[in-house]
């Protein structure tokens, strides 16, 4: 549990959250070096970002670990918008594993839209964070999807919400009666 002091500002998520994530990775490496991650899936963007350097890029550079940005919503970057063309491209994703490139008006491929499961018509937006190519990033995310959200991110979300719920519902710790302070 951490206390976040910076407000959420769109496009600046890394400045709010990455210090805590870096600290978590460092603590894991110190306490359980045998569990050093081979790659990090990040609930956010990598290169598919207004400044070309999202939370997955920040975390990857600071930890020197391969990172993949996995976003649930499309950021409006380099001419990418949820217009009729984009909606038609989404409709073209017929089955689990189908993709299409997210090409900006500059001609740069900023990421890939992925239909991660057959039961969801909403794609994920995959982008490179650090030390990984887009093709490998997409293949990795595909392999982790049982449902729409890749299982590592889904489990982290489920477990963190359960932890918060438990903390919110737990009675405050009370000193045993009869103790003097």
Image: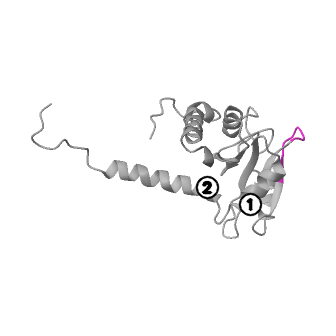
Q: Which residues are magenta?
A: 101-108
The residue most toward the left is: 178
Q: Quadrant of the C terminus?
A: top left
Q: Residue at x 16, y 44 (%)?
A: 176
Which residue is tagged 2?
152
**Element on which disc 1 rests:** helix
Upstream in the sequence, badge 1 or badge 2?
1
Q: Nearer the viewer, residue 116 or 29?
A: 29
37 vs 180: above or below: below
Which residue is tagged 1?
142
Q: Residues within 10 Å of mark 1 (few under 14, many from 20)?
A: many
Q: Nearer the viewer, residue 170 or 97?
A: 170
Q: Residue at x 65, y 58 (%)?
A: 150
Numbered mark located on residue 106 in the image: none
Q: Residue at x 64, y 45 (%)?
A: 36
Q: Position of residue 133 (x, y in %)?
A: 83, 46
Q: Position of residue 173 (x, y in %)?
A: 25, 44
Q: Position of residue 126 (x, y in %)?
A: 74, 50
């Amino acid at each position: 549990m951490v206390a976040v002091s910076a407000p959420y500002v769109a496009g600046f998520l890394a400045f709010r959250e990455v210090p805590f994530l870096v600290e978590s990775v460092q603590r894991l490496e110190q306490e359980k070096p045998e569990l050093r991650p081979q790659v990090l899936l990040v609930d956010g963007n990598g290169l598919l970002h207004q400044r070309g350097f999202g939370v997955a890029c920040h975390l990857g550079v600071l930890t020197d670990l391969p990172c993949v940005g996995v976003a649930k919503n499309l950021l409006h970057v380099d001419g990418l918008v949820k217009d009729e063309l984009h909606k038609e491209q989404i409709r073209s994703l017929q089955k689990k594993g189908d993709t299409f490139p997210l090409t900006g008006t500059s001609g740069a491929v900023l990421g890939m839209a992925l239909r991660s499961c057959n039961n969801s018509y909403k794609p994920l937006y995959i982008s490179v964070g650090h030390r990984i190519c887009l093709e490998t990033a997409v293949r990795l995310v595909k392999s982790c999807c049982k449902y729409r959200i890749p299982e590592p991110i889904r489990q982290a979300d489920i477990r963190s919400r359960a932890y918060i719920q438990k903390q919110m519902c737990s009675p405050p710790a009370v000193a045993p009666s009869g103790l003097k302070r």
